[in-house]
Image: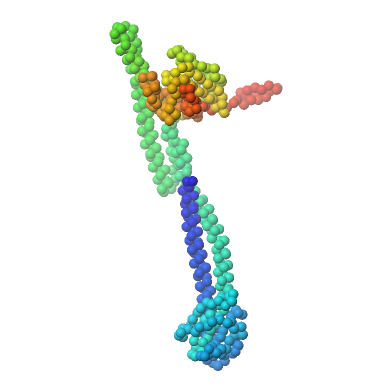
């Protein structure tokens, strides 16, 4: 699974923030514990100081009054370890005096509770005081529970904000991507939207538009060259062919074979120039030609008649039925003509044509009974000047542009054309074009009539 930039940034930012919040939470819990513990230490230190002052003044009472938590305790031990005074609820805890006059703080467990204990020497006596620290633990647990809820919520909120912000930042990039995806060789005049801000995305858009300017300029120069060259070549080729026809009618038998060969080459060269001119016109057509309803069966029958007038060929039309599409009749005729010529020139035996309506499309199949095509090279045959093998070489009459022109025309009609990979009796080219939308029908006096704009 490939994650997009937006998702990756959101995930990384969320994980980083989650880690930072967790570390911060741990630090906050520890700081809270230290602060509360220091507060208890200050209370114990103050209590022991008051006990020491009372002992010095000779007014130390026994038992010693409890201060703070009711479970707190204090005790004064003599040099021999005997208890001089203590609180009523004396806790049986091991009390070690500090080795010097500095007070000692320690945390000890007595039963199920933990106590914070301070011991300090005062002359020959040892004063110790302690208090439970369950409040510290409870406060820490409450803070941990709060953080356990707050941290995931904060992370999710941040992830949502990052997702929204990154989406807004990347929206110009997505707009550029959508526009570029729709730009083709027919629409190089289109440009990507340029954001108002002169940031990285703005510079990307401007750079891409500059690149499109260069591509458009180079493509237009190439198209003009092909169109001009093809157009200029047609006249001298036509003149040469006419002169060869005249010369052949008066040529000596010894020269006829040579002149006939030259004539055939001129015919082939003329066909190539015509194909190049057609491709140039297709490539240069920024806007589609005027279109209307086209009966594809009429186009097929017309091209078959043309083919039969040019050469003797067997064509099976038994599977041809009606199919109506929206398009350019002349262009569609050229596409059908190229498919037929491809089958006749490169195939063997009778050519079979099937035309029907299928799944909302006009289905046209032209099949021959030759050697077929290599399935691995079938798609390449629709590239310009591509020939699969020796059977489809120039010597057989092909220019390598017929199928390429047919695909360009069909694609311009939102259709597809390809070799049928399941056909095994030769080669079959299948063309599919969306059918024309049916005209709305109205019911008048029980009869169904075609709606023509007035009832």
Q: Choose top left, top right, bottom left or bottom right for residue 114.
A: bottom right
Q: Position of residue 422 (x, y in %)?
A: 50, 27
Left or right: 445 as drawn, with respect to 108: right
* Residue 284 visible (yes or no): no
Q: Which residue occupies 48% across, 24% down? A: 424
Q: Residue pushed farthest bottom?
A: 58
Indicate left or right for 165 with 277 as reference.
right
Q: Quadrant of the C terminus?
A: top right
> As drawn, is 156 to the left or to the right of 451?
left
Q: Residue reaching furthest right?
A: 445
Depth check: 123 or 181 in front? 123
- Relative to 278, is 322 on the left or the right? right
Residue 310 locus on image (x, y percent): 43, 13
Residue 222 seen anywhere in this rendered image of the structure? yes
Question: Does 99 sit above or below residue 362?
Answer: below
Number of callouts in the render? 0
Up-down relation of residue 312 to residue 219 (above or below): above
Q: How was the colour assigned to the protein in this rendering? A: rainbow
Comparing 62 with 244, the one in front is 62
Q: Position of residue 205 (x, y in %)?
A: 42, 43
- Residue 354 at x, y = what percent? 53, 21
The residue shown at (52%, 75%) is: 37
Residue at image x 58%, y 80%? 72
180 in relation to 407, above or below:
below
Most foreground residue, 323 or 95: 95
Residue 224 location, quadrant: top left
Q: Residue at x 49, y 90 (%)?
A: 123
């Amino acid at each position: 699974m490939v994650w997009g930039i937006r998702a990756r940034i959101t995930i990384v930012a969320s994980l980083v923030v989650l880690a930072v919040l967790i570390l911060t939470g741990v630090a906050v819990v520890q700081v809270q514990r230290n602060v509360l513990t220091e507060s208890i230490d200050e209370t114990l230190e103050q209590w022991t100081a008051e006990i020491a002052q009372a002992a010095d003044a000779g007014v130390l009472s026994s038992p010693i009054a409890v201060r703070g938590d009711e479970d707190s305790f204090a005790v004064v031990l003599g040099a021999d370890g005997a208890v001089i005074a203590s609180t009523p609820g004396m806790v049986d805890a091991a009390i070690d005096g500090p080795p010097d006059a500095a007070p000692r703080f320690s945390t000890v467990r007595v039963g199920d509770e933990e106590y914070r204990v301070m011991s300090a020497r005062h002359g020959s006596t040892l004063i110790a005081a302690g208090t439970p620290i369950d409040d510290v633990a409870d406060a820490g647990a409450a803070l941990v529970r709060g953080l356990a809820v707050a941290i995931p919520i904060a992370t999710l909120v941040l992830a949502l904000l990052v997702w929204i912000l990154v989406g807004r930042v990347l929206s110009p990039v997505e707009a550029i991507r959508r526009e570029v995806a729709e730009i083709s060789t027919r629409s190089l005049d289109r440009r990507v939207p340029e954001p108002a801000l002169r940031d990285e995305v703005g510079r990307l858009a401007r750079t891409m538009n500059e690149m499109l300017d260069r591509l458009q300029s180079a493509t237009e120069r190439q198209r003009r060259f092909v169109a001009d060259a093809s157009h200029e070549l047609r006249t001298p080729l036509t003149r040469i062919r006419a002169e060869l026809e005249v010369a052949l009618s008066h040529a000596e038998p010894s020269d006829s074979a040579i002149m006939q060969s030259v004539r055939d080459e001129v015919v082939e060269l003329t066909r190539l120039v015509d194909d190049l001119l057609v491709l140039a016109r297709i490539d240069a057509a920024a806007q589609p030609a005027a279109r209307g309803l086209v009966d594809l069966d009429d186009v097929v029958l017309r091209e078959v008649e043309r083919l039969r007038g040019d050469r003797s060929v067997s064509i099976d039309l038994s599977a041809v039925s009606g199919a109506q599409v929206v398009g350019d009749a002349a262009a569609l005729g050229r596409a059908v003509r190229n498919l037929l010529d491809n089958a006749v020139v490169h195939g063997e035996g009778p050519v079979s044509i099937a035309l029907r309506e299928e799944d909302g499309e006009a289905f046209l199949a032209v099949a021959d009974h030759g050697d077929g095509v290599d399935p691995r090279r079938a798609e390449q045959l629709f590239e310009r000047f591509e020939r699969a093998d020796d059977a489809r070489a120039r010597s057989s009459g092909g220019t390598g542009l017929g199928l390429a022109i047919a695909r360009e025309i069909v694609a311009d009609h939102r259709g597809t054309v390809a070799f049928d990979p399941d056909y095994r009796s030769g080669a079959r080219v299948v063309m599919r074009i969306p059918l024309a939308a049916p005209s709305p029908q109205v019911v008048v006096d029980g009869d169904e009539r075609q709606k023509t704009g007035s009832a």
